[in-house]
Image (cartoon, grey):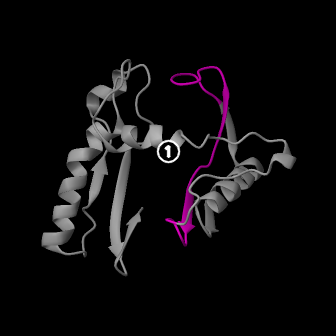
Amino acid sequence: LEFIKARDLPDAWFQCVYQILDTGRTYTIDRGSYEGQKRIEFDYITVHIKYPGKRPLLPDIPPALGIPNPVDNDYLDQYLPYLMTSIKKEGEEYTYGEYLEPQIKEIIRMYREDGHGTNQAYMTVGNPKTLYLSDPPCLRGIDTRIKDNKLHFV
């Protein structure tokens, strides 16, 4: 079990990379994206980010380190529609947004009309048929809570 307290998203990224290299479990991917390659993963991690909206959202690696940035600056513009909307680009079998988009509206309605004291504001990604895709979603669900008037993803 890993627990990381971070200042912002870039700090969380750096701490996660450091921690996974130190304590992560390595395995070979037998099926799905990057089949045959090695992957490192946490058994379980919790990341608490004190200022999640602080800019920049992406990590900025100093050039002197000689390590390429994990994502370029246009990454968010390209990825957020895939995450948040149901619009598919050519060749895409799914978007996370096609599963999340209708549920986000219901989560908002639930919190507004029924109050914040619930543990049932959970969004599912995928359906039973996604198991048969060549590259099914790796994000499987998002649990939400409102505590101290702040939205938390659990």
Which of the image's four quarters has the C terminus?
bottom left
- The relative height of residue 13 versus residue 41 in the rendered view (above or below) is below
**Residue at point 28% right, 26% down?**
129
Place of residue 41 in the rendered image (x, y in percent of width and height, measured from the top left): 63, 43
**Residue at point 79% right, 41% down?**
67
- Report the front residue among 28 and 117: 117
- Quadrant housing residue 134: top left
Which residue is most to the right? 64
Residue 34 in magenta? yes
**Residue at point 55% right, 61% down?**
46
Q: Which residue is mark 1?
A: 76
Which residue is most to the left? 113
Mark 1 is surrounded, within 10 Å at the Cα level, by few (under 14), some (14 to 19) or many (20 or more) other residues, namely: some
Residue segment shown in magenta: 28-53
Helix, strand or loop: magenta stretch = loop
Query: Left or right: where does residue 94 sit relative to residue 32?
Result: left
Query: Left or right: where does residue 4 sit relative to residue 46?
Result: right
**Residue at point 54% right, 67% down?**
48
- Quadrant housing residue 146: bottom left
- Disc 1 residue type (three-letter): Leu
Place of residue 105 in the rendered image (x, y in percent of width and height, measured from the top left): 20, 54
Place of residue 125 in the rendered image (x, y in percent of width and height, measured from the top left): 33, 41
Query: Left or right: where does residue 23 sit relative to residue 43?
Result: right
Which element type, helix, strand or loop, lies under badge 1? helix
